[in-house]
Image (cartoon, rainbow, N blue to C red):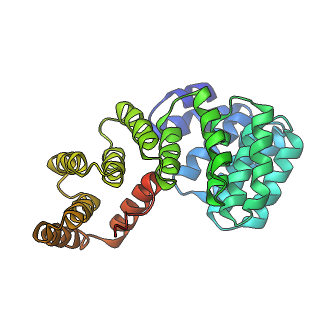
Amino acid sequence: MNNLGTLTRHPEDAEHYYRTALDTNPQHNRALFNLGNLLKSQGKKEEAEALLRDSIRFGPHFADAYSSLASLYAEQKRFAEANEVYLQGIESCPDSSDLHNNYGVFLVDTGEGDLAAAHYQHAVRLKPAHYVAMVNLGRLLRSSSENKEAESWYKKALQVTRKVDILTPLGALYYNTGRYEEALQVYREAATQQPDSTDIWLALAQVLAMAGRSKEAEKMTLGIISKQGSCIECYRLLSAIYSKRGNYTECISNEDLAQCFTKKPQTFVSSSMARLLELIGPWPQWT
């Protein structure tokens, strides 16, 4: 029954299967874990916590249960309890690379980034193909301007798999260190994987503009706008391009459009800008 729950796409059916499995065996740690995760995703935190605790009690060497319970505590800002669960998990499941990686993310999120690097590295030692830990380590190193080391870890991750989630932070590193041709190459590869991603195409246009290829940047940005007219950052980039050329009429009109679109809910604007800054870094400051 537990396995049937993992196969269905309907939450109501999954819950039925998990509960049926638990009626047969109340100590079925995987069914406890799966039902706990399902209820956690539905915001039923108290029951989810109890189920995940029981999953750990009846299956103390199941690493995923520790990560799930710890993340539930972290979401509730119960950081001391989350930290304790992670440490218990690492002690009980010393060979779990994911636990070390997840604990590293938790440490970064709670302001203990100095301690996170060791756990990312340990995750990679346990599982040399753990590209997620490699990227996380790269991001951590980049945040402290250790760009060479960060680049090295991104490239190690790309040796495992060439995913957009690895390509884009490497492109951002190249962009922010003035290596525009390398940034273009990386972003173009990312665009072939996600051709419908506005963020990636806008990142490409941004790099083209900074590389002095404003005509190409303009054409690409206008192409994005033709598909997504509410792209706030597109109008800002066009405004910067036209300002650089001295075309102040176009600059002002595009800046006005950007201001118009920013009248949308602030949460939309903030999340949109945050995603773009993750991809390409700050906007150009031309002199």
Find residue 94 and report its horizontal and vertical position in percent.
Answer: 86, 38
Q: Left or right? Give the position of 133 relative to 200.
A: right
Q: Name the residue located 84 percent from the left edge and 38 percent from the top edge.
A: 93
Q: Position of residue 160 (x, y in %)?
A: 61, 27
Q: Quadrant of the N terminus?
A: top right
- Tell me the residue at 80%/34% (across/down): 125
| Left or right relative to 107: residue 14 | left
Task: Give the side of residue 226 with respect to residue 61, left or right.
Answer: left
Q: Residue at x 62, y 54 (%)?
A: 142
List the single residue furthest toward the right.
91
Based on the displayed image, in which of its 4 quarters is residue 230 positioned? bottom left
Q: Is residue 62 above or below residue 202?
A: above
What percent of the width, then of the height, locates residue 57? 83, 45
In this rendering, the count of numbered labels is 0
Q: Is residue 115 above or below residue 65?
A: below
Quadrant of the rendering where the C terminus is positioned: bottom left
Q: Quadrant of residue 25?
A: top right
In depth, the one of 210 and 140 nearer the eye is 210
Q: Residue at x 57, y 57 (%)?
A: 44
User: Can residue 243 be seen from the camera position used here?
Assistant: yes
Task: Say if 121 sits above or below 192 in the image.
Answer: below
**Residue 26 seen from this side:** no
